[in-house]
Structure formats: structure tokens, C-alpha cells
Amino acid sequence: MQLRGRNQRGEPGYGPHLDRDNDGVGCEPYRGR
């Protein structure tokens, strides 16, 4: 498996635990609030 930044729902390696804001994109950089 190749590790690369962001991954989207449905792609190998995606997991809901990686998607904190539940927008379907995991491993996003933290932007604060």
C-alpha cells in the first residue's frame, strides 16, 4: 500500500476514524476553527 495524503470515502485505506469532519475526505490537514 502506498501512503499518500488525503483519501476519499470508497478508496482503499479510507476509514471513518480518519475523517473528523465527516465530509468524505480523510487525512486532511488540521485548519482549526
Image (spheres, helix red, strand yellow):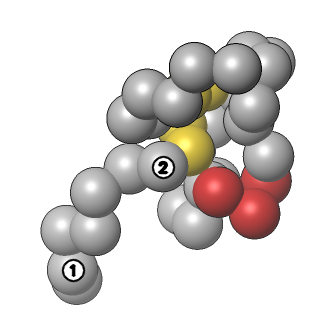
At which x and y percent is residue 25? 54, 37
The amino acid on which the numbered mark 1 sits, given as a three-letter code, is Gly
Residue 5 position (above or below residue 8): below
Residue 26, quarter of the rendered image? top right
| Residue under the image location 43 percent in, 28 percent down | 4
**Element at badge 1?**
loop
Q: Quadrant of the C terminus?
A: bottom left
Label 2 environment density (alpha carbons within 10 Å; few <14, some 14–19, many ≥20): some
| Residue under the image location 74 percent in, 35 percent down | 14
Which mark's residue is nearer the viewer, 2 or 1?
2
Label 1 environment density (alpha carbons within 10 Å; few <14, some 14–19, many ≥20): few
Residue 31 falls left or right of residue 7: left
At which x and y percent is residue 32? 21, 80
User: How far is mark 2 from mark 1, CA to CA?
Assistant: 14 Å
| Residue under the image location 79 percent in, 20 percent down | 12
Q: Kindly identify which residue carries mark 1.
A: 32
The tally of labels here is 2
Q: Kindly identify which residue carries mark 2.
A: 27
The amino acid on which the numbered mark 2 sits, given as a three-letter code, is Cys
Q: Quadrant of the N terminus?
A: top right
Residue 33 position (above or below residue 7): below
Residue 9 falls left or right of residue 23: right
